[in-house]
Amino acid sequence: MLTDTYTRDHMTNLVKINNQRYVVDVGFGSNGPTKPIPLEHGYNFTTIAPARGKLMYRSLIEHSDPDQRVWVYSVQEHADALWRDMYCFVEIEFFPGDFEVMNLKTMTTPQSFFVQNVMCIKTILNEEKTEPVGWVILHRDYLKRRVGDKSEIVETFKTEDDRIGALEKYFGIVLSEGAKRAIKGLASELRPKGEHA
């Protein structure tokens, strides 16, 4: 995600179909694209209405050489909102070892979002199952349903058992006994109030 600095900590896939290249991104969550996006400068599209996405091939303010360019994916939550940069990427092929190095900080730094939180997101489709209309989002100690610009908390969790039950009920994820125990002692574990790791 682009915050104070533009870091490459997100994986996107570039695919070519009939000489047209597309960005295919299934892992960015509720601000991510919901379908393959043509790799074209200025391409503007609806993600889940009223939100829109955009691809731009441009330089970043941090670049010491203003001739450098990267692809920047941005989101506008509704027509009156400002565009927010989400992430950037380049067209260089990365290998498994590259991702291991890039992922190390994301998965081990105590302040990392992914160390501090449990998150799971599922797309809600329309009745015809042809278009995305919303999301079911499990984040830390709650489950939220967001359709368009309407959002509601469906469930809150007090214990790991509550959250494990929600993973199965809403996402079809059944954890093994070993996976259930693996969160014990981690920053992302749900503990009763007052109990510390």
Image (tube, helix red, strand yellow):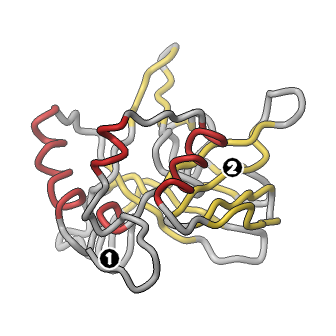
Where residue 10 sits in the image (x, y, percent)?
A: 34, 51
Residue placed most toward the observer, 72 or 47: 47
Q: Residue at x 74, y 61 (%)?
A: 154
What SS does tag 2 mark? loop
Q: Residue at x 34, y 61 (%)?
A: 114
Image quadrant occupied by the C terminus: bottom left
Residue 134 numbered tag: none
Residue placed most toward the observer, 42 or 146: 146
Labels 2 and 1: the sequence-earlier one:
2
Instruction: State which quadrant residue 65 falls in.
Output: bottom left
What SS does tag 1 mark? loop
Give the distance between the C-alpha atoms of the residues marked 2 and 1, in whole angstroms.
Answer: 26 Å
Residue placed most toward the observer, 55 or 109: 109
Instruction: State which quadrant residue 148 falls in.
Output: bottom right
Q: Nearer the viewer, mark 2 or mark 1?
A: 2
Q: Residue at x 50, y 17 (%)?
A: 17
Residue 47 numbered tag: 2
Instruction: State which quadrant residue 5 falls in.
Output: bottom left
Give the residue type at disc 2.
Thr
Q: Residues within 10 Å of mark 1 (few under 14, many from 20)?
A: few
- Position of residue 186 relative to residue 82, above or below, is above
Give the residue type at disc 1.
Ile
- Position of residue 1 relative to residue 165, above or below, is below
- Position of residue 138 relative to residue 38, above or below, is below
**Given contact means CB atoms under 8 Å apart, are the residues at marks 2 and 1 in contact?**
no
Image quadrant occupied by the N terminus: bottom left
Q: Residues within 10 Å of mark 2 (few under 14, many from 20)?
A: many
Determine the residue located farthest toward the right in the rendered image. Answer: 127
Q: Is residue 22 left or right of residue 13?
A: right
Where residue 127 sits in the image (x, y, percent)?
A: 89, 32
Q: Residue at x 46, y 44 (%)?
A: 27
The residue to which callout 1 is attached is 61
